[in-house]
Image (cartoon, rainbow, N blue to C red):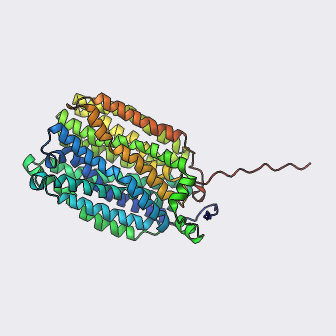
Amino acid sequence: MTETPPSPAAGTPVLPGRPRKAALAAWIGSALEYYDFFIYGTAAALIFGKVFFPTSDAASGTLLSLATFGVGYAARPVGAFVLGHYGDRLGRKKILSVTLVLMGVSTFLIGCLPTYEQIGIAAPALLVTLRLLQGLSAAGEQASASSMTLEHSPDHRRAFYTSFTLNGTQAGSIFATLAFIPIAALPDEQLFSWGWRIPFWLSVVVVLVGYVIRRRMEETPEFERVTAEGAVARFPLSVLFREHRADVLRVTAAALFATVSTIAGVWALSFAVNTVKLDRSALLWVSVLANVVALVAIPSWAVLSDRIGRRPVFIFGTAGCAVLMVAYLWAISLGGYVLIFIVGILLLGVVGSAANGLQPAFYSEMFSTRVRLSGVAIGTQIGYAIAGFSATFAATIAGSDGTNWQGVAVLAAVLCAIPVIAAATARETYRIPTAQLGMKPVKVAPTEAPA
């Protein structure tokens, strides 16, 4: 039986105050949720190799630790299929609450884990299990927040309001790094025994604050319109892959841009601290300052995108990062802190924000309301799953001594070329009304002129 799609309405009224409220809820929720996700990446680069893999040599321990970071990304496609289905069936609001609680609980439990010395191989096994739960949660977080904000926004400012979803992830990274800076300064004995656990335990606050905020958010008018028309898809995934296969592939390819933050924030941190022997607190400050700059840069690029389109801004940001990654790894290899700070801020704070800030609108606008959450979740999470292992690929390419940063720079450049191609083939959507997004253009036959 063929499902009846919704009628192509000219637009859904935007209630006063709803866009700002949705953007705030997305920002706070994403900041709190990605705080949990980012502290794992920092701990994987600096802590877990010695705590959970102490029987390996230093290089192998770091490689295994970074592999557990990638495991979280491997779980994301599974979570995307499940949470995407229910998000398009039941609404955006319910999924946002589920993802927050799941992430907070799994992160808190990571902070409670016994070490390898205490329970042996069971310790890294439990770590991987909880990391999988983090990945399942993150799979639905960004897609749900992006869908929620976009469907509450006026047509001409969708990129601006949805950019606060990614803006929140930058804030989460700042909070996570700030939490680790005083911890990283502890003597090794305290750091590797109890100090590293504190940022994970703080996730209790994440659950309480985030859950209250999101429970008070209203469902989107676009989803309510589709529900009122009886056009909610019974099986969103079947509709998605029947009508939007090319868009799912396009989003997957574009999402490989996440390799920039993964390589720069995880592998490059390990390279700087463990190989070049730079101060770990100083390198963490690079991330903090870059993300502070990004808090301003992301909405600024989004405003530009609302005026000139999604594709040119996204392509500029991705191509620029391919060049700056080479400069950033070179600066780390030289060991000059001033150069590292300048290039790091340009890479992660300024140019990278051009692509980051556009993702929520650019990806979400490729799909109709009926399958938007599924399409964004599945497309991005498959891409992120590949990107999540880029730190492991980088560690392998760098060699046993970890010095081949040039090979890692080439890897990052290649992985940035794929999103550029994907964006160049995408349909420009910034002038299309929200209710008509994801629909095939209607060809109107020319009327015959009277004799």
Q: How many marks?
A: 0
Residue 173 versus residue 121: which sits nearer the camera? 121
Considering only vertical position in the picture, is 6 above or below 342? below
- Looking at the figure, which quarter contains the N terminus? bottom right
Q: Residue at x 27, y 35 (%)?
A: 396
Instruction: Tell me what residue is drawn at x 57 percent, y 57 percent.
Output: 434
Position of residue 187 relative to residue 271, above or below, is: below
Q: Nearer the viewer, residue 257 or 238?
A: 238
Left or right: 168, with 228 as reference point: left
Rendered position, 414 above or below 53: above
Identify the residue shown where x is 11% and y is 49%: 186
**Residue displayed at 30% across by 35% down:** 342
Residue 12, image quadrant: bottom right
Residue 201 in view: yes
Q: Is residue 339 visible?
A: no
Q: Where is residue 436 drawn, in percent x and y?
A: 60, 57
Up the image or down, 89 lies above or below 430; here it is: below
Residue 378 placement (x, y as % from top left): 44, 53
Q: Locate residue 57, reporting x and y percent.
A: 14, 38
> Can you name the residue that lies furthest to the right here?
451
- Give the quarter of the image for residue 239: bottom right
Farthest residue toward the front? 1
Residue 88 locus on image (x, y percent)? 49, 63
